[in-house]
Image (cartoon, rainbow, N blue to C red):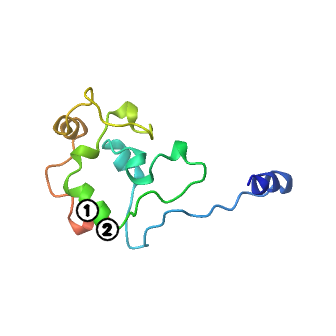
Amino acid sequence: MLEPVRNSLRDDRPLVWRRVTDVPDFVYFDHSIHIAKGVGCSICHGDMANMALTYKAKSLTMQFCLDCHRDPGPRLRPKDKIYDTSWTRDATTPAPEVLLAQYGVPQRSLTDCSICHR
């Protein structure tokens, strides 16, 4: 399994990555706004830290995105847990309404077509 890594080092050539997740060209997606607004990586990518091999954990269909955009609060987490792929909500986690306010998630609809389609 590590042979491509060894060959890359030996031949001084970059690894060729196989994309696991790809969205159509007409979809605009920016990781930084999601991270800034409290959406952890594992919401879309699963528990990457514990995957022996990377696989597509979520469908990332338009419906998947719309479900989150319609009700983002339950998917938000504290800033210090954004990159913790095994994090789960517990009794010490601020309520979704608190996190929505803390991150300044707008009250306007996050389902306007132009948010994702530009």
Residue located farthest toward the left when viewing the structure as drawn:
107
Left/right of residue 54 with respect to residue 38 in the rendered view: right
Q: Quadrant of the C terminus?
A: bottom left
Q: Is residue 27 above or below residue 81?
A: below
Q: Is residue 17 above or below residue 84?
A: below
Q: Position of residue 29 (x, y in %)?
A: 38, 60
Q: Is residue 8 above or below residue 35?
A: below
Q: Position of residue 18 (x, y in %)?
A: 61, 64
Q: Are marks 2 and 1 in contact (CB under 8 Å)?
A: yes
User: What separation in Å lies between label 2 and label 1 (alpha carbons)?
Assistant: 6 Å
Q: At x 39% / y 36%, what residue is drawn?
A: 87
Front position in the image: 12 or 61: 61
Tag 2: residue type? Met
Q: Which mark is residue 66?
A: 1
Q: Quadrant of the N terminus?
A: bottom right
Residue ID for mark 2: 62
Q: At x 44% / y 39%, what residue is drawn?
A: 86
Front position in the image: 56 or 114: 56
Q: At x 79% / y 55%, what residue is drawn?
A: 3
